[in-house]
Image (cartoon, rainbow, N blue to C red):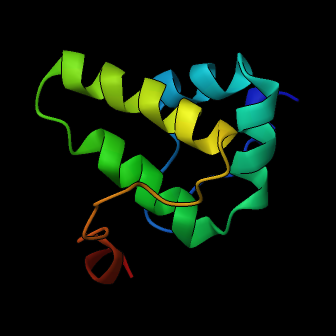
Amino acid sequence: MSQENISTGVVHELPEDLKQALLSDTCALGAWEDITPLARNEWICWIEDAKKPETRTKRINRGISDLNRGKRRPCCWPGCSHREKGK
């Protein structure tokens, strides 16, 4: 699958670092494509909300792991606050 064919969220575009992580893990990529655009949006927002680069990296790694385990949304995330603003 090429980068331009990876699905994105409803408000947030797929960031390059998350794209690369998904491309490197076919199982996580399959799970990513199986979730809704709204769920993908939640993952992207959760990752982009990290204040420090090391936190962002941890969230990407955890996201890949969680997707591999069948999780469809980030745990303990109140939801994307940009959803209503972006429409």
Tell me if residue 41 comes above or below residue 13 in the rendering.
Answer: below
User: In this picture, is 31 found above or below 87?
Assistant: above
Instruction: Tell whether 87 sits left or right of 30.
Output: left
Q: Residue at x 44, y 31 (%)?
A: 62
Horizontal and vertical percent for residue 53?
20, 18
Q: Quadrant of residue 67?
A: top right
Please name the residue shown 88% across and 29% down the image.
1
**Who's the residue at 77% across and 52% down the image?**
33
Where residue 77 appears, as percent x and y from the top left, is 28, 61
Using the rendered view, name the quadrant where residue 39 is placed. Answer: bottom right
Residue at the right extreme, as displayed: 1
**Residue 23 x/y as whole percent:** 72, 22
Is 37 above or below relative to 46? below
Residue 58, given in percent of the width and then of the height, sits at 33, 23
**Residue pictured at 42% horizontal, 61% vertical:** 42
Give the camera-side residue of 65 and 49. 65
The answer to whether one can see residue 12 in this image is no
